[in-house]
């Protein structure tokens, strides 16, 4: 019994599909930055509330600092792309 598999040759993508794929590929860093920003922002709000309650541990403080760093990095990515509007900022 042979373990070789055969696959049908694939045709080149049509021009319209290549164009759509290129747009999606170019947008991925922006989509990722929005996701990182929004997730980090929620985490930062939760940790800031913990700090105000006086119950923040050193680990929580490190997590808050990291969340703020993630937000800053994502904001920089979006600013470079001219898309701060996606996170409620001026573009």
Image: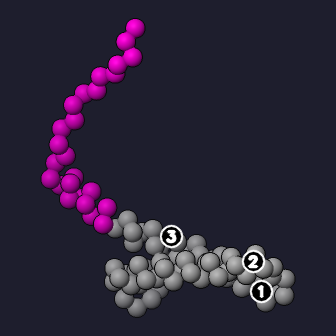
Which is more toward the observer, 14 or 6?
Answer: 6
In front: label 1 or label 3: 1
Q: Which residues are magenta?
A: 1-26
Q: Residue 54 sits in which quadrant?
A: bottom right
Q: Secondary structure at mark 1?
A: helix
In the image, is residue 72 part of the stretch drawn in magenta? Answer: no
Residue positioned 39% across, 17% down in the render = 3
Residue 79, image x, y percentages: 39, 84
Q: Would you call the spot at circle 2 few (<14 residues within 10 Å), some (14-19), or many (20 or more)?
A: some
Farthest residue to the left: give it.
15
Name the residue beneath numbered marker 3: 35
The answer to whether the residues at label 3 and label 2 have Cβ atoms under 8 Å apart is: no
In the image, is residue 15 part of the stretch drawn in magenta? Answer: yes
Lateral position of residue 61 relative to residue 73, left or right: right
Lateral position of residue 75 relative to residue 18, left or right: right
Q: Residue 64 sits in which quadrant?
A: bottom right
Q: Earlier in the sequence, mark 3 or mark 2?
A: 3
Instruction: Reply above or below: 67 against 53.
Output: above
Lateral position of residue 83 relative to residue 70, left or right: left
Name the residue beneath numbered marker 1: 51
Residue 52, image x, y percentages: 79, 89
Residue 4, image x, y percentages: 35, 19
Identify the mark at residue 60; answer none if there is no mark. Answer: 2
C-alpha separation, residue under disc 1 versus residue under disc 3: 24 Å
């Amino acid at each position: 019994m042979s373990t070789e598999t055969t696959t049908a040759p694939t045709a080149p993508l049509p021009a319209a599909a290549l164009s759509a794929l290129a747009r999606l590929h170019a947008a991925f860093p922006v989509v990722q930055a929005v996701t990182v920003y929004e997730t980090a922002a929620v985490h930062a709000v939760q940790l800031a509330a913990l700090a105000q309650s006086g119950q923040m541990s050193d680990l929580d403080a490190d997590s808050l600092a990291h969340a703020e760093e993630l937000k800053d990095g994502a904001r920089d990515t979006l600013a470079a792309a001219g898309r701060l509007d996606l996170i409620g900022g001026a573009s």
